[in-house]
Image: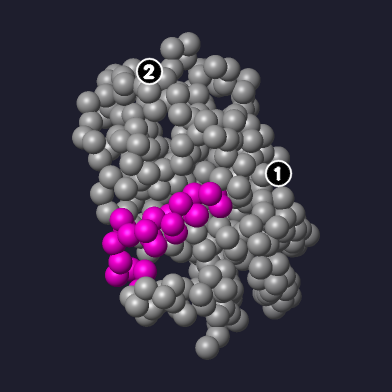
């Protein structure tokens, strides 16, 4: 068996030790005589796994007690629709800062329910920069301000938490959660689909300040209600148990590796290897993002022609570097360097880039 370095943007690479443990436990788990995917979510054994995953995530991210942590089926896009239903009255003003594809998606999911004010939009500049805070046109009466902490497709990332005053800041952290320490108390809600940095697809984490659970929101079914999920420890219905278990294993692995401070160090090292290779290539490789907001997680770049882009992707794959094709919205190449990507993967990519340039530059 050969495991390649997998630069997929999501679903993305997972730690090999997590996959091995899951493999070893697939048929029979924890002495219960069955697989974890075959037992009740209400069994004491599974409830303990779920509670441990929450406790470990709280430790990993330093989540204060006045925040609830929800584990919900589905992806980040589902949360983008649930946010306005839970946090805003029907037709109420909400502010969105659009810094790339996922900010636009968040707006699209919210529009049926609320009055979306686009407080700032980077699209005119091709999403190569994040509009400066001083230029945002925030509403006085917004229910919340929404940002995308890291834009997975356009490769731009907030490098500091914007000050939005007393209005709750809601942030989509799908592709950068746990990549570095964060101050959770600066946010009203942090949400993330798991499949980039936390585990497998099919489960999303919502970290919500408890006072926001008291908001009336708008008419919605129980199953769309954050308060109901919080009151029932995210077991209102059958949660995605296998995903929750894998997420728990992944979070435990992150803690054992040294936590978010250690991943911040590793992620900075991996990203700077690739950016240095791009910047040192004399223009053969190009990343067009403003340096101050370059993402550490997702690095889009271009070669001198679409032909070379395609050859790069194909030869990289043959060399054991997978999934480097850029998203169709941007084109070119994209290298995703999540927590589970080892430094050796970034080194192998940088070496391949040097070699490819020598042969084609
Ligand atoms: C992947 C991603 C999403 C969408 O997640 P789904 O699970 O496909 O709904 C939303 N936001 C960001 C920042 C992402 O990276």
Judge whether residue 51 is colored magenta. Answer: yes
Instruction: Identify which residue, 284 or 166, lies in the foreground.
Output: 166
Res 91 seen here: yes
Q: Residue 258, percent across and down? A: 70, 58
Residue 291, numbered label: 1
In-front residue for pair 146/51: 51
Taking the image as shown, residue 224 lies to the left or right of residue 98, namely left
User: Which residue in the rendered view is the most extreme toward the bottom?
Assistant: 1
Query: What residue lies at 43% left-to-right and 25% top-to-bottom?
Result: 212
- As displayed, is residue 210 above or below residue 43? above
Q: What crowding class fits label 2: few (fewer than 14 Cα within 10 Å), some (14-19), or many (20 or more)? A: many
Identify the residue at horizontal 53%, vertical 67% (top origin). 14
Look at the image and give the residue range highlighted in magenta: 35-57
Q: Residues within 10 Å of mark 1 (few under 14, many from 20)?
A: few
- For image coordinates 51% across by 19% down, the residue present is 167
Q: Which residue is mark 2?
A: 93
Q: Point out the image quarter for the C terminus.
A: bottom right
- Magenta run includes residue 247: no
Label 1 or label 2, whichever comes before in sequence order: 2
Q: Main secondary structure of the magenta part?
A: helix
């Amino acid at each position: 068996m050969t495991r390649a370095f997998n630069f997929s943007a999501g679903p993305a690479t997972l730690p090999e030790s997590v996959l091995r443990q899951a493999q070893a436990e697939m048929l029979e788990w924890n002495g219960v005589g069955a697989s974890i995917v075959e037992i009740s979510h209400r069994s004491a054994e599974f409830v303990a796994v779920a509670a441990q995953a929450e406790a470990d995530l709280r430790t990993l991210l330093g989540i204060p007690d006045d925040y609830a942590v929800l584990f919900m089926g589905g992806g980040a896009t589902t949360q983008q629709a649930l946010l306005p239903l839970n946090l805003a009255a029907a037709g109420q003003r909400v502010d969105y800062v659009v810094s790339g594809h996922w900010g636009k998606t968040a707006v699209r999911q919210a529009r049926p329910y609320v009055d979306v004010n686009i407080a700032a939009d980077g699209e005119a500049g091709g999403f190569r920069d994040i509009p400066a805070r001083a230029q945002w046109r925030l509403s006085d009466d917004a229910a919340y301000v929404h940002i995308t902490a890291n834009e997975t497709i356009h490769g731009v990332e907030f490098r500091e938490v914007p000050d939005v005053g007393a209005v709750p800041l809601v942030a989509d952290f799908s592709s950068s959660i746990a990549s570095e320490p964060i101050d959770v108390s600066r946010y009203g809600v942090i949400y993330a689909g798991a499949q980039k940095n936390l585990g497998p697809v099919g489960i999303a984490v919502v970290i919500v300040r408890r006072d926001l659970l008291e908001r009336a929101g708008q008419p919605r079914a129980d199953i769309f209600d954050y308060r109901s999920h919080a009151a029932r420890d995210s077991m209102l219905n059958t949660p995605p148990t296998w995903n929750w278990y894998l997420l728990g294993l992944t979070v435990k692995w992150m803690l054992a590796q040294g936590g978010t401070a250690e991943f911040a160090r590793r992620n900075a090292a991996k990203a700077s290897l690739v950016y240095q290779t791009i910047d040192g290539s004399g223009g053969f490789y190009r990343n067009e993002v403003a340096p101050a907001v370059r993402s550490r997680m997702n690095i889009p770049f271009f070669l001198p022609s679409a032909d070379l882009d395609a050859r790069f992707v194909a030869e990289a794959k043959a060399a054991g570097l997978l999934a480097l094709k850029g998203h169709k919205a941007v084109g070119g190449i994209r290298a995703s360097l999540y927590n589970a990507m080892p430094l050796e993967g970034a080194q192998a990519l940088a070496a391949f880039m040097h070699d490819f340039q020598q042969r084609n530059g």
